[in-house]
Image (cartoon, rainbow, N blue to C red):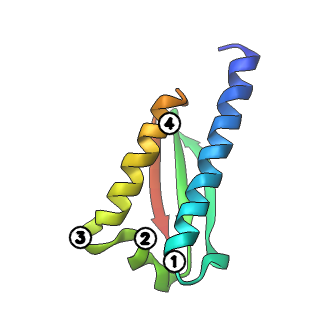
Amino acid sequence: MTWDNKTADEAALRRIEDNLGNLVREIVDSPEDVRIERHQQDGKTVLTIHSNRNDVPHIIGKEGSMIQSIRRVFLSISKKNQVGELILKVCE
């Protein structure tokens, strides 16, 4: 991978991270508490959603339907941008 590709990947991951934060802030009651943390684990990018504990059910959704939908959207975006495998986690 060349330097230009690394820079492009970093910019794409930053956009993905920002868009994830913006989406989650729209569905929670305490958007000011939402924070997205990014790190690498076993060659994969992990995005962890931190929020107010009362908002976790909003993010997870009934039977996990909301987080599954969010994961599908962001996995598609990561594939389109060719940034590698993406893992989403939710923490309070």
Residue wearing tag 2: 59
Q: Are marks 1 and 3 in contact (CB under 8 Å)?
A: no
Q: How crowded is mark 1: few (under 14 residues within 10 Å), some or many (20 or more)?
A: some
Question: Which amino acid is tagged 1?
Answer: Val
Mark toward the start of the polypeptide (1 vs 3):
1
- In the rendered structure, the answer to whether residue 68 lies left or right of residue 92 reads left
- In the rendered structure, the answer to whether residue 64 lies left or right of residue 15 reads left
> Tag 4's secondary structure?
helix
Residue 63, percent from left and from top: 23, 70
- Camera-nearest label, 1 or 3: 1
Question: Which amino acid is tagged 2?
Answer: Ile
Residue wearing tag 1: 28
27 above or below 46? Answer: below
Question: Which amino acid is tagged 4?
Answer: Ser
Mark toward the start of the polypeptide (1 vs 2):
1
Mark toward the start of the polypeptide (1 vs 4):
1
Identity of the residue drawn at 46% across and 53% down: 88
Question: What is the C-alpha distance between the residues marked 1 and 3?
Answer: 17 Å
> Tag 2's secondary structure?
helix
In this view, the residue in front, 59 or 92, is 59
Q: Residues within 10 Å of mark 4 (few under 14, many from 20)?
A: some
Q: Do the residues labelled 3 and 4 touch (CB within 8 Å)?
A: no
Question: What is the C-alpha distance between the residues marked 1 and 4?
Answer: 24 Å
> Tag 1's secondary structure?
loop
Identity of the residue drawn at 46% across and 65% down: 90
Mark toward the start of the polypeptide (4 vs 2):
2
Question: Which amino acid is tagged 3?
Answer: Glu
The image shows a total of numbered marks equal to 4
Q: Using the image, tell me which numbered label, if any, was put on residue 63.
A: 3
Mark toward the start of the polypeptide (3 vs 4):
3
Residue wearing tag 4: 78
Is residue 46 something one can see in this rendering? yes
